[in-house]
Amino acid sequence: MSRFVALVPAAGSGSRMGSALPKQYLPLRGEPLLRHTLRALAAADAVERVVLVLSPDDDRFDAAMAAGLAKLEVLRCGGASRAETVRNGLEALAATLDADDWVLVHDAARPCLDPAEVGRLIAELRGDAVGGLLALPLADTLKRVGDGGRVAATVPRGGLWRAQTPQMFRHGLLRQALGRAADDGVTDEASAIEALGLAPRLVAGSERNIKVTYPDDLALAGLYLDARNAQ
Ligand code: C5P
């Protein structure tokens, strides 16, 4: 039987947030944002292990940060890009995972993930030859910006989806894909798989699974967490 392991790259600096504190440590409803993310993954029954990949220089994560979090393992082998961080994490997992085991890569900065969605992603993809990802069809009209902040073109949005995470692929295939990819432009795991000529499956996700990137996102994430806790 294949196993399911979550891998959380958390070695980014979050420069777009405009804060000295990396965004995974920003306070969100009384706890560092990262704890919400790790708890959501551990709450998915099928997920056996939650592997967090930090930067070797990270001096903010300590035992207190990890207290009470189930299934957690911490690695300190993050790299200069997200792809490198994931690649290093996969290499470290090679000793304990088979090539056919599944890895669910999830952004540290998506704290509103619903554990039920992780279960749904696994149920939909566990028999798939390639794997896939949570994603959402685009709702807004898209504009390409030109000179002087003016619209150069309207980009047809038909057939366009926004990629989210988790992105779920077999350990062996993902390791092969990221081993070959140049890191430039590899902003998610699916694009590295696509570069092998394979077509990952899109599984419809939720608008609530936002990536905290800008300051306003943090307030919205708090509201989504409140709404879930009130259910
Ligand atoms: O910066 P961005 O929001 O695209 O980062 C997405 C995820 O990748 C975050 O969880 C971030 O911590 C992680 N990352 C990483 N190593 C890097 C850059 C980003 O683990 N060098």
Image (cartoon, rainbow, N blue to C red):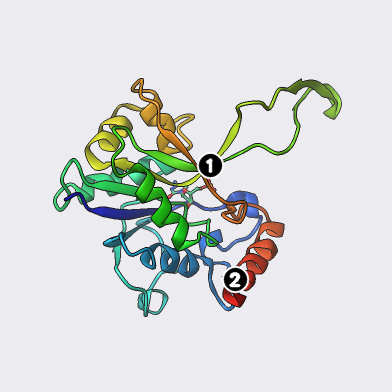
User: Can residue 81 be seen at all in this image of the molecule?
Assistant: no
* Disc 2 crowd, CA 10 A, few/some/many (<14, 14-19, 20+): some
Residue receiving disc 2:
28
* Disc 1 crowd, CA 10 A, few/some/many (<14, 14-19, 20+): many
Which image quadrant for residue 220? bottom right
Q: Residue at x 20, y 49 (%)?
A: 2
User: Where residue 75 sits: x, y (%)?
Assistant: 29, 59
Q: Secondary structure at mark 1?
A: strand
- At label 2, the amino acid type is Leu
Q: Residue at x 56, y 52 (%)?
A: 14
Say whether disc 1 or disc 2 marks the residue closer to the N-terminus.
2
Q: CA distance from mark 1 to mark 2?
A: 24 Å
Q: Residue at x 45, y 60 (%)?
A: 116
Residue receiving disc 1:
135
Say if 8 sits above or below 197 in the image: below
User: Can residue 120 be seen at all in this image of the molecule?
Assistant: yes
- At label 1, the amino acid type is Ala
